[in-house]
Image (tube, rainbow, N blue to C red):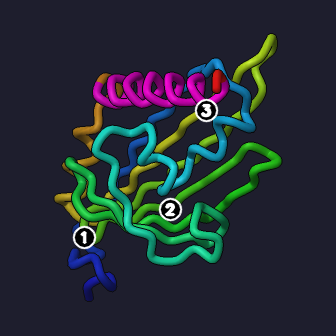
Amino acid sequence: MNEPGIGESADDFVARRVVRWTHFEVDAAPETVFPLLCPVREREWIENWEAAMVYSASGVVEGGCIFTTVSPLLGKALYVTSRHEPEAGRVEFVVFFPGTCVQKLDIAVSPRAGGGSRLHWSRTYTGLSREGNALIEGITEEAFQKQMTELARSLSRHATQIERK
C-alpha cells in the first residue's frame, strides 16, 4: 500500500534526512533584523525573491502565516510559519516541496555582545520520495555555506542601511 501523497511503497522507500546550519553576525540590532525575516520584507534584501501570500491576518509574517515561493533547486514550495516569537527572536517555517521533500527552517536572532545581532540558521530536509532523497543529498555542506554566505551579506548590508537612516 502506498503512503498518502508520496507515491512510494512503504516496503521499499526509506526517507533520507539532511541537516545544514550556520551562524553569522549582522551589524544591526535584533529589532532591525528580525522583521526582515518575512516573505514580504525579504523582497527588500534577497535578489529575485518572490513570494505569494496565501494567508496572513496582518499582511506580514506571523504565526500560522502561509505563503508560496519557487526554489531553483527544489521547485514549488508552500511555507507554513509554525513558530513566530519576535520577543524571543525565533521564527520557524515548515516548507513543503510536493512529492520531493519537507524542510524545517529555524532561525534564531540574538543580541551580539558589543552591538549587532547573531543569527543561527538551520535547515532540516527530509525526503518524501527517491527523487527527493537525491535532491536533498545534493545539498552539500559547501553549497549550503556558499548560499548562506551570500544571504548573510545581503541581510547584513540591508539591515545596516536601515539603521543608518
Residues at marks 2 and 3, CA–CA distance in whole angstroms: 17 Å
Amino acid type at mark 1 = Gly
Amino acid type at mark 3 = His
Between 60 and 135, the residue placed more toward the observer is: 60
In this picture, which residue range is highlighted in magenta? Answer: 143-163
Q: Find numbered disc 3 in the image and state the secondary structure of the residue it sits on.
A: strand
Q: Is residue 156 magenta-colored?
A: yes
Q: Most extreme residue toward the bottom, as rendered?
A: 1
Which residue was labeled with disc 1?
Answer: 99
Which residue was labeled with disc 3?
Answer: 120
Residue 39 is left or right of residue 161, and the answer is left
Q: Residue at x 77, y 16 (%)?
A: 115
Q: Which mark is residue 94?
A: 2
On the image, the x and y values in percent for residue 54 come to 45, 76
Q: Residues within 10 Å of mark 3 (few under 14, many from 20)?
A: some
Asked whether residue 14 appears in the rendered view, the answer is no
Residue 27 is left or right of residue 152, and the answer is right
Q: Find numbered disc 2 in the image and state the secondary structure of the residue it sits on.
A: strand
Residues at marks 2 and 1, CA–CA distance in whole angstroms: 15 Å
Q: Most extreme residue toward the front, as rendered?
A: 165
On the image, the x and y values in percent for residue 146 come to 33, 23
Q: Find numbered disc 1 in the image and state the secondary structure of the residue it sits on.
A: loop
Residues at marks 1 and 3, CA–CA distance in whole angstroms: 28 Å
